Image (tube, grey):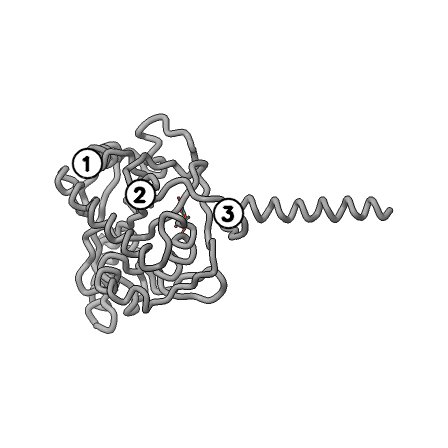
Amino acid sequence: MASNLRHFSSFALALILSISFSSSSVWASQREFDYFVLALQWPGTICAQTRHCCSSNGCCRSEPITYFTLHGLWADYDDGTWPSCCTRAGFDINKVESLMPELQKYWPSLYCTSSKRCFGGKGPIWAHEWEKHGTCSYPVIQDEYNYFATTLNLYTKYNVTRILENAGIDAANSAKYLSGEVVSAIKNEFGATPLLVCRHGSVEELRICFNKDFSPRDCVNESSTLMEDISKSSSSCPRYISLPTYEPLVHGDLRGKLVTSERTNMNRLVASA
Ligand code: U2P
């Protein structure tokens, strides 16, 4: 009986451990990562969903953002999973004070809700990204300042918005591009295969990947670790995709309301026609 109980409790413990350790979001005993993902977001797709405005949301600026913005620099494993929340080094905004103008311009939150921090509470997107991903970038990246400075450097060095513009792929509501054409434009300039993420046929994210020495490498598809052909690198995207623009809802300004009600009236007119 006692031995059965012992077996049962070891089994239960093993089960609990295997459930929690199979998740990609555990923080204990995480092995060193394999490569970096630089995740960039297309505000045109995300901001088109904005219904409420607040000062911290980049979508609420008076001018629409027409360039890819930063989501994060992620330390990932080759098998498509990733470590997260690797140390207890909490985000300290004072450490990145000198980078604030660039962070605000190129790494804004595109939502009003604040982001989850690793060990409780909420904070700005930078706190989420540093605590969840930056702390797992050791030993390549050793501290918070280095995490943000490195990410901004990579972002500036590989200007994907400019690469696409040079290939004739511009932000526009009606233009459709072959997803393979977008992937090839990046591949030709960057030298490795990116990953596209779409929402309803619009580009939501473009991810480019790096070895630990920051040389470009192919990205690993989240749903498949086999990169057999170029179409796999844009699996959530249909054959034709767009890079839409949006009309901002302006925070603390009636313009947003006007834009929204004008749009609603227009929709009514179109519906009744
Ligand atoms: O794709 C949904 C969310 O999963 C996290 N992610 C995804 C791919 C990857 O290679 N690494 C990774 O971390 C991201 O979580 P976040 O940083 O937003 O919390 C991504 O948004």
Mark 1 / mark 2, whichever is N-terminal: 1
Question: Which amino acid type is marked by label 2?
Answer: Arg
Which residue is at the far top? 228
Residue marked by disc 3: 30
The quarter of the displayed image where residue 101 is located: bottom left
Going from N to C along the chain, the mark reached first, 1 or 3, is 3
Which label sits on residue 189?
1
Q: Judge depth for marks 1 and 3 and give the one in front.
A: 3
Please, what is the three-letter code of the amino acid marked with disc 3? Answer: Gln
Number of other residues with Cα within 10 Å of mark 2, as a class: few under 14, some 14 to 19, many 20 or more: many
Please tell me whether mark 2 sits on a helix, a strand or a loop: strand
Q: CA distance from mark 1 to mark 3?
A: 34 Å
Task: Decide: is 147 above or below 176.
Answer: below
- For the point 29% across and 34% down, the residue is 193
* Disc 1 residue crowd, few under 14, some 14–19, many 20+, Cα 10 Å: few
Distance of label 2 from label 3 (alpha carbons)? 23 Å
